[in-house]
Amino acid sequence: MVSKIITRFPPEPNGYLHFGHAKSICLNFGLAKKFSGTCNLRLDDTNPEKENKEFVSSIIESVEWLGFDATKNLYYASDYFDFFYEAARLLIKNNLAYVDSQNAEEIKSNRGTLKQPGKNSKFREREITESLELFEKMKLGEFEPGKHVLRAKIDMRSPNINLRDPILYKIRFTTHHRQGNTWCIYPLYDFAHPLSDAIEKVSHSICTLEFEDHRPMYDWVVQSAKKTGLFKNQTLPRQFEFAKLNIENLILSKRKLSEIVDKKIVSGWDDPRMPTLDGAKKRGYVPEGFIKFNHLIGVTKASSNIELSLLEECMRGVLNDNVDRKISVFDPLELIVENVEEDISEKCFVPNHPKYFDRGKREIKFGKRLLIERSDFQVNPQKKFFRLTPGSRVRLKYAYVVECTGYELKDGVVSSVKVKMLKDSKSGTENSDNYKVKGNIHWLNKENAVPCEVVVFEDLFENKYGDDERKKQSEELSLNTKSKIVLKTFVEPSAVDAPNGSKFQFERHGYFILNKDEKNESCSFGKILALKDTWKKC
Ligand code: ATP
Ligand code: MG
């Protein structure tokens, strides 16, 4: 019988999840889904110093946000502390582990190097009963940290340093966010992780490549546990490695990201500039974009550095299909329609989506005084400029074709443009096709255009790391002082009437998310992404 696939995603709750974790989530939950198995979300909370409940809830929410069930198979490694302790005692009893009383320096210097074998500790052959007793006293809090440690008894001469009697338990008087002060000894990752996998009957323990050298230790732990009588009649889990996700110029390391948060360089882990999943959500990125991206890049053993533009393109693809269009004018220039009366206001209908008409349409009002983009008018047009110039015709999108009859200057700068509208050219009417114009520009009615702030985000750092992962980890970060720019714009009223968090494409400008304050008294838009720059050519 083919046994069920069980995978797990095991984040340590010492930070928020980042884009790299999304790859691991898609892989682990994706495989389980594909092969009708299950994927556990296991909070790997065995290292209490930097872990807390806030991180736990953000992790659960992020996994759910990506579209996976985070609560159905939710586990905490700290729930296995009793099990780990008993497993450690069994190892001692079976002469597979011992309490070492060397100090940290001695342990380090006796460990040897890549070229030199390590040296056995003088405590290595101490009596099993003595080790058991000491281990119990460690648990009871009778010793200072560093006084003793529990070590696996493997081989101090092993070419793989991870097998030179690695430490299994350390004394740490640290309060655990779930276990309180119950424990003052904590297991190390290389011991707790394989045991947690085996407890949960994980079949495929998938991790990133830096754990490849730890695989022999992983196998030693589960096989030794089995020798002592644990995990009877059970297939032991196996570790598989894959290459981490690296994205050019993005920092995907919780350690570095928490430094950025602690130094208050950003407003928090969920700042829209942070490469965290909460940051992405605030920025307006969509979970389907991450799924698409991870599907596209696939899973390999070879490290590679992916361009951020690929992720952006995935987001754009999803947003393009799923968000309504709205009109905004960033750098307004007044357009006066001479042959329209001051108080006239005429309805024009705009489809909410150019492709999906089932998304409905909305009404905008045409009138005498409009706003267009300053860049849509040139007095002396450059070559291939097909928008408004003196004497030229363009279509005001969803409304009329207009012909430019003049413009006014103030202090040498164009202050308004005058046009005449062609009365039978209205979009959607019979005659509209008779007017062939090359330019098509968007506009707002000056009467009801809503002034609004727009926040545009750029890279947080100026460093261009390229694909040098080590540099990314170690280099001092040089802050980009222009990573958050506030601009002013005008938008059509329906854009600000929408619920908080609504996402739109502002035609010809990009994708934006509406951010309302808690009381709905003020609002602004955050830029999610630019459009692909093709319209600029017309
Ligand atoms: P960081 O280096 O950012 O602290 P981590 O590996 O220490 O990450 P964990 O909480 O241990 O963070 O990660 C949980 C899981 O996510 C692990 O299985 C890890 O292999 C995986 N993971 C972490 N970073 C990446 C990445 N960049 N690409 C793919 N998977 C990742
Ligand atoms: Mg880790």
Image (tube, rainbow, N blue to C red):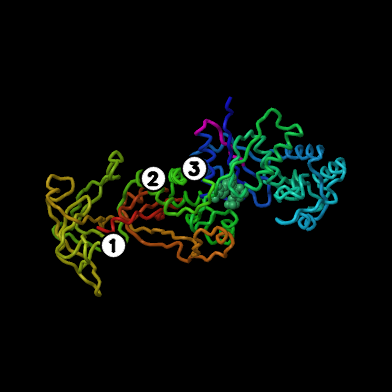
The residues bearing labels 1 and 3 have C-alpha atoms spaced at a distance of 38 Å
Amino acid under label 1?
Pro
Q: Nearer the viewer, residue 431 or 437?
A: 437
In the displayed structure image, the side of residue 235 where residue 279 appears, left or right? left
Above/below status of 471 relative to 306: below
Label 1 element class: strand
- Residue under label 1: 332
In the displayed structure image, the side of residue 14 where residue 275 appears, left or right? left
- Residue under label 2: 318
Label 2 element class: helix
Amino acid under label 2?
Val
Q: Hey, which residue is sitting farthest bottom in the picture?
A: 411
Q: Earlier in the sequence, mark 1 or mark 3?
A: 3
Callout 3 crowding tier (Cα within 10 Å): few <14, some 14–19, many ≥20 = some
Q: Quadrant of the C terminus?
A: bottom left
Please tell me whether residue 2 belongs to the stretch shown in magenta: no
- Residue under label 3: 65
Report whether residue 54 is seen.
no
Q: Nearer the viewer, residue 54 or 149?
A: 149
Range shown magenta: 34-42
Amino acid under label 3?
Trp
> Do callouts 2 and 3 mark residues in contact (Cβ within 8 Å)?
no
Q: Hey, which residue is sitting farthest top in the picture?
A: 1
Callout 1 crowding tier (Cα within 10 Å): few <14, some 14–19, many ≥20 = many
